[in-house]
Image: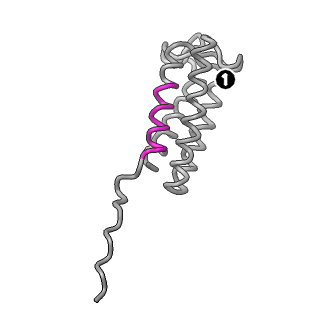
């Protein structure tokens, strides 16, 4: 869980920074696929930094981050699908952004809410004689 949150934070941070790099981003399109702008990039950078910091704290912090992050990105995806080309008029999105936001939200929510398989229930203690 913490490793996923850490790597996810690193990817978001890199994507956010790349959004500011001419050549990687042309005409407001990252890699020719995703709509980006300054605010969109800043959100990715900040989210990435928060994920990295949280991943270093604890498993519980990582799990809570993924739950909150999943809900927020789910809402961003829904609003993006509804509005088509922006999220609340704050930053531009396209269908690729909306689908990616939805996939990320589902993955984050699944990881944040899934039961940890490593913690098996304790076996009942043998009766004392």
State the residue at coordinates (65%, 30%): 42
The magenta stretch spans which residues?
A: 101-114
Instruction: Examine the rendering and report whether any part of residue 17 can be seen.
Output: no
Q: Residue 99, position in %: x, y? A: 48, 20
Q: Is residue 46 left or right of residue 122?
A: right
Occupied quadrant, residue 94: top right
State the residue at coordinates (48%, 17%): 31
Q: Is residue 15 left or right of residue 111?
A: right
State the residue at coordinates (52%, 57%): 58
Helix, strand or loop for disc 1: helix
In depth, the one of 101 and 6 nearer the eye is: 101
Which residue extends farthest bottom? 129
Q: Residue 69, position in %: x, y? A: 57, 37
Q: Is residue 57 above or below residue 79?
A: below
**Residue 74 magenta-highlighted:** no
Q: Residue 15, position in %: x, y? A: 53, 29
State the residue at coordinates (56%, 45%): 65
Magenta span: helix, strand or loop, mainly?
Answer: helix
Instruction: Examine the rendering and report whether any part of residue 47 can be seen.
Output: yes
In depth, the one of 42 and 23 nearer the eye is: 42
Dot 1 corresponds to which residue? 38
Q: Residue 49, position in %: x, y? A: 59, 42
In depth, the one of 57 and 110 nearer the eye is: 110
Characterize the local packing of mark 1: few (<14), some (14-19) or many (20 or more) Cα atoms within 10 angstroms. Answer: some
Which residue extends farthest right? 89
């Amino acid at each position: 869980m913490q490793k996923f949150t850490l790597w996810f934070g690193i990817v978001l941070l890199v994507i956010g920074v790349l959004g500011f790099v001419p050549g990687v981003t042309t005409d407001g399109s990252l890699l020719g696929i995703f709509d980006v702008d300054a605010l969109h990039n800043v959100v990715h950078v900040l989210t990435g930094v928060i994920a990295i910091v949280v991943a270093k704290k604890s498993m519980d912090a990582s799990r809570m981050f993924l739950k909150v992050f999943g809900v927020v990105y789910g809402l961003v995806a829904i609003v993006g699908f509804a509005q088509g080309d922006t999220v609340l008029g704050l930053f531009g999105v396209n269908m690729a952004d909306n689908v990616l936001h939805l996939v990320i939200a589902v993955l984050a929510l699944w990881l944040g809410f899934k039961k940890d398989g490593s913690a098996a229930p304790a076996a009942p203690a043998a009766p004392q004689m």
